[in-house]
Amino acid sequence: MSTILVQRPPVLKFHHDGGFRNHRKFSRISATWTMRMDSKSSRTTKKEDLSIVSIPQRSNDLRFDRLQPSDRELLHHDRFEFGKFVAREALLDEEYWTAAWLRAESHWEGRTNERYVDNFKRKFAEQEFNAIKRRCRGLNGQRHYCIVAVKKDEGNVKRTVLKSVVGTLDLSIRYLLQGENFPGERVNPPLFGCINRRGPNRYGYIANLCVAKSARRQGIASNMLYFAVESAKSNDVELVYVHVHRNNIAGQQLYKKMGFKMVEMESSQPVEETDLLCIKM
């Protein structure tokens, strides 16, 4: 496992009931390096603040003035504190929505001049919001977690959910299909794609990693990844995979510095635009 530079020694708070269950006791990480996701200046503008979030059209069940959960409410949920932030599992629908909107902002980043881009982002976010909720309910024996990075409260100042979520990623605990050696391998599995549920065929999969523009260059991505990998390990998973687009140089560097290595594929596999990386615990 590679090491991560944080602003001060990280505080790890993990519990055995609720959240990611049956965790092993995590060790501290030493501070020797950092990863920057954006080479631009860290100066922020109001337009870049994630607190300016589009409200979904059907929002009767969402309270956008809701405060982020307190430390007491999170007492039995695993979390990883680093600097001014905390990485943990999303707990509220409002956090799911904010994570979905952050992903929409990331997906359409650099395309703000396109016509109807705001409508596209809203539709994307609404679809992702519903997808996150479905995935977190479980599918075909898989376990899915939406992980968020949130700003910690400062003094007596309490932040709403919309103003606290600054990063997100997905972690899934999955099983290889019969005949697969790695996720997505082109094989001819038995009828109905039989899932091999033996222990060694269980793996973790990370997707949808993104950080708000206003919060980049603060180690949020690397620390969310650390939390996700350790959470997968606590689920008795030995391998964690991620697909990274070949044009995403910053993402490639981040995963490799975290200890991910390229998965060697047979020449018979079709050429993809993404690389498959893996870390072994």
Image (cartoon, grey):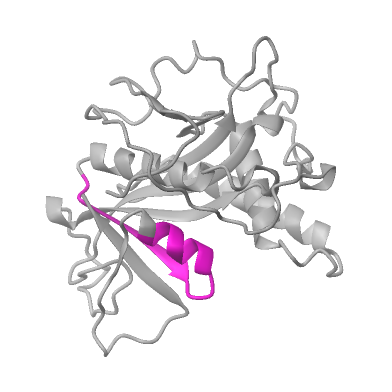
- Which span is picked out in magenta? 237-256
For residue 216, side relative to residue 157 (left or right): left
Residue 21, given in percent of the width and then of the height, sits at 29, 28
Query: 278 or 7: nearer the eye?
Result: 7
Q: Residue at x 41, y 66 (%)?
A: 243
Q: Residue at x 31, y 56 (%)?
A: 259
Does residue 44 sit above or below 175 in this rendering?
A: above
Query: 191 or 47: nearer the eye?
Result: 47
Residue 241, given in percent of the width and then of the height, sits at 33, 59
Number of on-image labels: 0
For residue 96, side relative to residue 52 (left or right): left
Q: Residue at x 68, y 49 (%)?
A: 213
Does residue 233 sit above or below 131 in this rendering?
A: above
Residue 60, given in percent of the width and then of the height, sits at 74, 31
Visible in this render: residue 162? yes
For residue 270, side relative to residue 150 (left or right): left
Picture quadrant where residue 110 is located: bottom right
Query: 31 or 262: nearer the eye?
Result: 31
Does residue 209 sit above or below 74 in this rendering?
A: below
Q: Residue at x 57, y 19 (%)?
A: 69
The answer to if 97 sits in the magenta stretch is no
Residue 226, given in percent of the width and then of the height, sits at 38, 43
For residue 40, side relative to residue 257 (left or right): right
